[in-house]
Image (tube, helix red, strand yellow):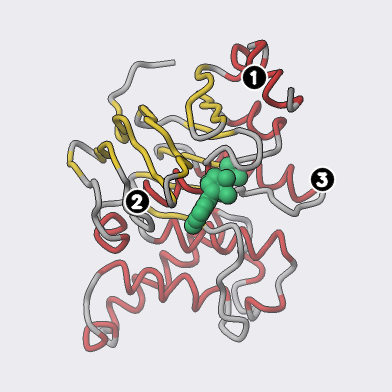
Amino acid sequence: MRQSRAILVTHGLSKQFQGFRAVSEVDLSVAEGTVHALVGPNGAGKTTLFNLLTGFLKPSGGRITFAGRDVTGQPPERIARLGVARSFQVTSLFPQMTAREHVELALQSATGLGRRFWRSDKLIRRFSARAAELLDEVGLAALTERPAGSLPYGQKRALELAIALALDPKLLLLDEPTAGMGLEDVDRTTALITRIREGRTVVMVEHNMNVVGSLADTVTVLQRGEVLAEGPYDQVKADPQVIEAYLGA
Ligand code: ADP
């Protein structure tokens, strides 16, 4: 793999809840253009770490640098504006709105322009052309006019990806992109992430090790809030400490 610069770096990142260290002194370095997976047993601190990276939680200690800027303690809107988009584990769609409307709305809000500008014909055409491209990219070209609420689960998750991509993020954070999916949807989602990762940087929390193995360039294993191991999937998978952690020993 080509050496690239780190787009996201944490130093000694920690989060305590009433004295309990959910994330403890985590040093993370995510290289630009790579897929970086965060794995670990339940309670390892993956969600807390994600919430720290996106500003949903404020760290108790340590620093976070994104694209060369210190973003420690910044609110989620600011981190999003700098180019970090997140897809959620639980769907957050409006059931009555169509797939196209969701993506157009995301494109409109990404411009930061007020409603007055949205009425410009030129902009509306641009948004609808881009929305069509993004929906095509996530495999929903035939379903653009369907209300989101009527889409099957796997396609709802694909729509959420299109919404996250509408922000044209420098960094895409995926929270368990295959959670709750059957085999077919898992395969489809893996293929989809393989497509959308081109030219992008992805950090994902993922439980399915086949998915991690086929997508991730680097894997960071967390246990009890600390980094237990880090490296390419094959190396991490063979690490006796990791095997022990997963067997719950
Ligand atoms: P994971 O996502 O790896 O399963 P979490 O980040 O959800 O792990 O949780 C890590 C630890 O922090 C767990 O022991 C959990 O109970 C604890 N924790 C998470 N959020 C809170 C909170 N808001 N208050 C107290 N403890 C929490």
Q: Dot 2 corresponds to which residue? A: 84
C-beta proximity under 8 Å, tags 2 and 1: no
Dot 1: element:
helix
Q: Amino acid at mark 2?
A: Val
Query: N-terminal of the two: label 3 or label 1?
Result: 3
Give the left or right position of residue 22, taking residue 12 as reference.
right
Residue 216 sits in quarter: top right
Q: Residues within 10 Å of mark 1 (few under 14, many from 20)?
A: many
Give the left or right position of residue 156, taking residue 164 as reference.
right
Please, is residue 108 above or below residue 191 in the view? below
Q: Nearer the viewer, mark 2 or mark 1?
A: 1
Q: Does the beta carbon of the residue at mark 3 sit less than 8 Å from ligand 1? A: no
Q: Amino acid at mark 3?
A: Leu
Please, is residue 227 above or below residue 163 in the view? above
Q: Position of residue 162 (x, y in %)?
A: 51, 60
Q: What is the number of the mark on residue 183?
A: 3
Residue 31 sits in quarter: top left
Dot 3: element:
helix
Q: Residue furthest left?
A: 69
The residue sitting at 38% across, 58% down in the picture is 56
Q: Dot 1 corresponds to which residue? A: 242
Q: Position of residue 116 (x, y in %)?
A: 22, 88
